[in-house]
Image (cartoon, coloured by chain):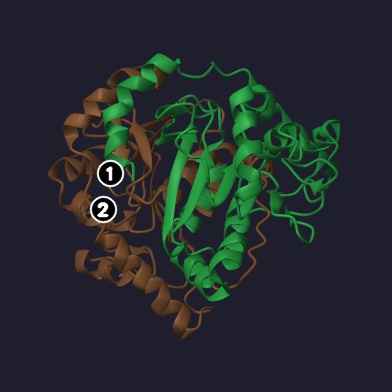
Chain colours: A brown, B green
Amino acid sequence: MTQIAIVVYPQFTALDFIGPYEVLRNLPGAQVRFVWHEPGPVAADSGVLLVGATHSFDETPSPDVVLVPGGPGFAEAARDPKVRTWLTSVAPTADWVASVCTGSLVLAAAGLLEGKRATSHWVAVNQLSAWGATPVTDERIVFPAPGDRVVTAAGVSAGIDLGLWLAGQIAGAERAKAIQLFIEYDPQPPFDSGHRSKAGAGTVSRSMAMLTRDSLRPGPLKAASALLWESAVRRVRR
Amino acid sequence: MTQIAIVVYPQFTALDFIGPYEVLRNLPGAQVRFVWHEPGPVAADSGVLLVGATHSFDETPSPDVVLVPGGPGFAEAARDPKVRTWLTSVAPTADWVASVCTGSLVLAAAGLLEGKRATSHWVAVNQLSAWGATPVTDERIVFPAPGDRVVTAAGVSAGIDLGLWLAGQIAGAERAKAIQLFIEYDPQPPFDSGHRSKAGAGTVSRSMAMLTRDSLRPGPLKAASALLWESAVRRVRR
């Protein structure tokens, strides 16, 4: 059994973790859970997508894989004492601690990236240095140094590549390739502006404008409403 | 305002629609909604991921964009009279009707692909011919014929490419490129087995075995439990 704990905090960016989720859930013996303070619906940065947390942090003391996504809510998650305590508590025994996008800043705030090379969303990557990490802007995945188990991926869609790499590490290349075919990951983007180095100045500024708008979106659901989802969540818990 | 209606049926495959959602929500004036019989949590094929339907079919009579994802639940969705009636009712006035993965079989069952070329997940694509469509196995996106507005994408991750293409059609290439940078879609898969033509026989059979397992997963949440989520959903409705 491989327990995969994906942290879902208010104002996450969904593709950050749905990419790796779709890969990692297909590992042999995979047991995915979505963790937050308590089970219940958590709202995405879009304000319209709800995803269910299935387990609390306290119920998840020893995951094999930890994955922290990014999103405009990363700053609040990074300041959350419970998030930091949980990350520092589970990291030493986890086989892998991974982040996508600004999830790396949550790991950094928990002290897990000190003295390490790491990446993040291109808009936020330089903030990593505030926590003693070395920002890397030209690697889609920053693999762990020998003996380390923390791996960080660039923005949003980079989580798919990260997930496949992790799948290869955990279950071998043959399984990872079967999962790649399962999700038919044979990318053919109609444009080629997926990295800052390939995008023109206009594209960069338009993209930044979209990010700013996101940070002005309404806040998370109140915790109380999460309780209403309790029974539905109970059905999917394992 | 561009209203984007994403159908979420029990046992969907999440990445199928989270990819295009992450792209299309960043269109100017985008109003995304997740539609099903009634608002409430809907369980993915993994049995552990819950996503919230925000609106009912009846509340969504004239979306600008319709997107149907795939997943092991596609066959039941394709047989559902309400799904078929709604699709045939909204298709004539929608600017775009799109599918990812086995979502095309739901469109086909509603009569929307008769006489047309279309694609689907590689395991299911040949089933399209049962509804009078011509299966296409070597195009990641099958674009509409002149004058038509139905577009179908291959399995799971192909939805990201589809989303970017649609974004270009709806808001122009510059906006689509900014969104591509926003989601940092500069794919670097660690393996190259994302299309059947590139995968060896072993990879194909391992991938098929995973699909078979999925079809044996427990069924959808009962409709009753959906009501428990009502209040949470109300907060994200627009």
Name the residue tied to disc 1: A9
Q: Residue at x 35, y 51 (%)?
A: A46
| Total numbered labels placed on residues in the image | 2
Residue B191 % position (x, y): 66, 53
Q: Quadrant of residue A142?
A: bottom left
Amino acid type for the residue under numbered disc 2: Gly
Res. A182 mark: none
- Assess disc 2: are there few (<14), some (14-19) or many (≥20) residues with their C-alpha within 10 Å of its C-alpha: many
Classify B20 as above or below A35.
Answer: below
In the image, taking residue B235 as reference, residue A153 lies left or right, namely right
Residue A113 % position (x, y): 28, 58
Name the residue tied to disc 2: A73
Residue A169 visible in the snapshot: no
- Callout 1–callout 2 Cβ contact below 8 Å: yes
Between B153 and B199, the residue placed more toward the observer is B153
In the image, taking residue B198 as reference, residue A42 lies left or right, namely left
For disc 1, the chain is A
Residue A220 % position (x, y): 23, 45
Amino acid type for the residue under numbered disc 1: Tyr
Classify B223 as above or below A144.
Answer: above
Q: Quadrant of residue A227?
A: top left
Residue A21 visible in the snapshot: yes
Residue A82 % position (x, y): 16, 40
Under circle 2, the secondary element is loop
For disc 2, the chain is A
Between B233 and B156, the residue placed more toward the observer is B233
Between A90 and B222, the residue placed more toward the observer is B222
Q: Residue at x 21, y 34 (%)?
A: A37
The tag earlier along the polypeptide, 1 or 2, is: 1
Outermost residue to the bottom: A201
Quadrant that contains the C terminus of chain A? top left
In the image, taking residue B104 as reference, residue A198 lies left or right, namely left
